[in-house]
Amino acid sequence: MSGAADTAVPIVSVRAASCTLGGRKVLDDVSLDVMRGEVVVLIGPSGAGKTTLLRSLNYLEEVDSGEVLIGGVSIGHRDTANKKKVSTTELARRRREIGFVFQHFNLFPHMTALENVWNGPVRVLGTPKDKARRDAMALLERVGLADKGESKPSQLSGGQQQRVAIARALAMRPKVMLFDEPTSALDVEMVGEVLTVMRELARDNMTMIVVTHEMRFAREVADRIIVMDAGRIIEDAPPSQLFSSPQHERTKAFLSTIV
């Protein structure tokens, strides 16, 4: 990807992206720019295209038309003019700059929390194991789990597992973090501990794109809230504006069901 950071270039840029899955158009001419340090929250009804949009940002879903750029570079193609796909090795290299936290934690069950965090930097980035372990311990401490390094996922609560998953993503030193409903699989009492970590990341100016139904979090943390419906972006506004005076009727209808 690009070398020195250029604050004038969006860290994420989606240009006229469309995607059809199972015969249904799930993204329909979507365009979006996210600048470095921004926190953008995606909301909308089920099936609106939020998760597909998020997954397209690191090429877990391939758009049929349009383009997805990370730091000004196409995520899946050699360049914006040449639609030839990059190699598997090059795609993996480009994905390193994008952390992804899923609904379900996807931790390696046979590894401890500490091993889950340092494994990626050692195997993928070539970080010396001693340094990777030290960094992993610091990240576990950052997410409030300094005492759980030797615990296996089965010994952790859902909230603790999700915080390990966040630490694991951060260990790869990503430029942007993607969160797909990171609290939806958690019991109510565990939601707060994950959102607290995400708030701290926002305060540290981590670029974040978050799919969530946690409206209090969106109101407090987001720089912008994007509303999707039927595969399209129908509204894009700061929280203060969106919650006080939504412009689109579908936004009003959606917010009335959850706020």
Image (spheres, rainbow, N blue to C red):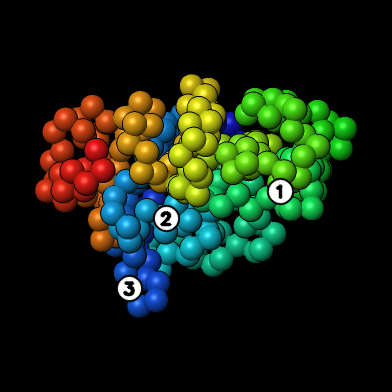
Give residue 243's quadrant in the image: top left
Q: Is residue 37 placed above or below 14 in the rendered structure?
A: above
Q: Is residue 2 left or right of residue 234?
A: right
Q: Residue 138 in the image: state x and y as whole percent.
A: 73, 25
Disc 2 or 3, which lies upstream in sequence?
Answer: 3
Q: Residue 73 in the image: state x and y as whole percent.
A: 51, 48
Q: Residues within 10 Å of mark 2 (few under 14, many from 20)?
A: many
The type of residue carrying mark 2 is Thr
* SS state under label 1: helix
The type of residue carrying mark 1 is Ser
* SS state under label 3: strand
Q: Residue 72 in the image: state x and y as whole percent.
A: 48, 44
The type of residue carrying mark 3 is Arg
Label 3 vs label 1, nearer the camera: 1
Q: Residue 147 in the image: state x and y as whole percent.
A: 75, 28
Q: Is residue 252 placed above or below 145 in the rendered structure?
A: below
Q: Is residue 169 placed above or below 7 in the rendered structure?
A: below
Disc 3 or 1, which lies upstream in sequence?
Answer: 3
- The Cα–Cα distance between marks 3 and 1, rounded to whole angstroms, is 38 Å
Residue wearing tag 3? 24
Q: How many marks?
A: 3
Locate the C terminus by quadrant: top left
Is residue 232 visible in the rendered structure shown here?
Answer: no
The dot on residue 51 is 2
Give residue 68's quadrant in the image: bottom left
**Which residue shows up at 55% across the image and 46% down it?**
101
Disc 1 or 2, which lies upstream in sequence?
Answer: 2
- The Cα–Cα distance between marks 1 and 2, rounded to whole angstroms, is 27 Å
**Which residue shows up at 68% across the image and 50% down it?**
107
Residue wearing tag 1? 154
